Image (cartoon, rainbow, N blue to C red):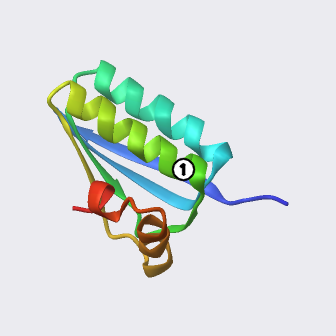
Amino acid sequence: MLHHYELRHEEKGTASTVRIEGELDIAGAAHFRRIVGDLMGSGVRRVEVDLSATEFVDSSGLGALLWAEHRLKAIGGQLDIVNPRRDVARTFALAGLDGILLH
């Protein structure tokens, strides 16, 4: 089965917006980590992740988002997750991560 996944990002100085379209699953999680790691390496300290077009997040996707949260905090940065769809927000809640990842 083919899954739709596309990641777009826009960098503005020390901040960046990453928009995930489709599904953030095991296939996209590694790509997301690479993008965030590259952004941090280029001096980005604040990453906004726009989930308005994200249809599904699995445990690998949750792990990648937690990884980004911890990595950014470790360097004095911040991860902001915005516009999650209701089903995706429910996934965060069921995993007990809504209080950590959804501020």
Q: Quadrant of the N terminus?
A: bottom right
Q: Residue visible at 40% across and 44% down?
A: 66
- Under mark 1, the amino acid is Gly
Q: Give 66 or 6, whichever is nearer the viewer.
A: 66
Task: Estimate how packed mark 1 is, as few (under 14), some (14 to 19) or many (20 or more) residues with alpha carbons within 10 Å.
Answer: many
Q: Position of residue 73 (x, y in %)?
A: 22, 34
Q: Residue visible at 28% across and 62% down?
A: 99
Relative to 100, 59 lies left or right: right
Q: Position of residue 64 (x, y in %)?
A: 48, 42
Q: Quadrant of the C terminus?
A: bottom left
Q: Give 65 or 48, whichever is nearer the viewer.
A: 65
Residue on which disc 1 sits: 61
Relative to 73, 86 lies left or right: right
Q: Quadrant of residue 46?
A: top left
Q: Give 70 or 54, whichever is nearer the viewer.
A: 70
Q: Residue visible at 62% across and 55% down?
A: 5
25 over 73 or under it: above or below: below
Q: Residue visible at 34% across and 53% down?
A: 49
Q: Secondary structure at mark 1?
A: helix
Instruction: Determine if residue 44 is in view.
Output: no
